[in-house]
Image: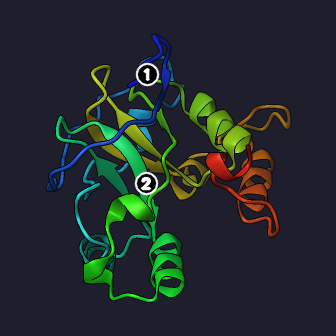
Amino acid sequence: MSLQHASVATFAEEGAPPSEAVEVEAEPTRGGAFLVSDVMTPLVYSCSLGDTLDRPARLMWEHDCGAIPVLDERQHTVGMITDRDICMAAYIQGRPLAHIAVASAASKHVYSVLPGAPLSEAHHLMKMHRVRRLPVVDIGGNLVGMLSLADVLRHSGGSLDLHHPLHVENVLTTLADAFRPGASRRPEDRG
């Protein structure tokens, strides 16, 4: 695991057992600037690399979400699995979801953010790596929440400065980039 001593961390590792939802209270922000903890979703459902694809598919259906963090045995985020990843794995492998390991379909690189990071920093990370969701992890790498572009967009209207990273036009540009067809969003596919 690679943990940078800044407010943004990157993880890439392998693991095993399943995890249940994790819920953490967000702390209030001082000084008026939004922090990741102010807008993140604190209740997150997850799966492990050893699970089969039916588990994240069921969690996504039951909890109306499109991505699930993948955790290792220490509860560290080591990947992400999306509804698209599940569909493509089932199609390409031609097997039922209960016979396909999460490890074969999940992304291997994870861009994550600490709860105390400024929201503008998380937005920059999303834009730079063309991702729509960031797991929120504590300094030990434990999952404490999820931040989506929708969360950022809901809190972006406050800045009137067009050059501010959280101005609604800048957030919409990031959203458009994340949905741009043709180029892969997975870091391992982009070389």
Could you say which disc has been placed on residue 151 in the image?
none
The amino acid beneath tag 2 is: Met
Ranked by sequence position, the earlier of labels 2 and 1 is: 1
Residue at image mark 2: 80
- SS label for mark 2: strand
Q: Position of residue 106 (x, y in %)?
A: 44, 59
Q: Position of residue 117 (x, y in %)?
A: 48, 24
Q: Is residue 81 above or below residue 108?
A: below
For the N terminus, the image quarter is: top left
Pointer 2 with pointer 1, Cβ within 8 A = no
Residue at image mark 1: 2
Q: Nearer the viewer, residue 105 or 27?
A: 105
For the C terminus, the image quarter is: top right
Look at 33% across and 52% down and name the residue there: 70
Q: Nearer the viewer, residue 138 or 123?
A: 138
Look at 63% across and 43% down and name the residue there: 126
- How many residues crowd around disc 2 within 10 Å: few (fewer than 14), some, or many (20 or more)? many
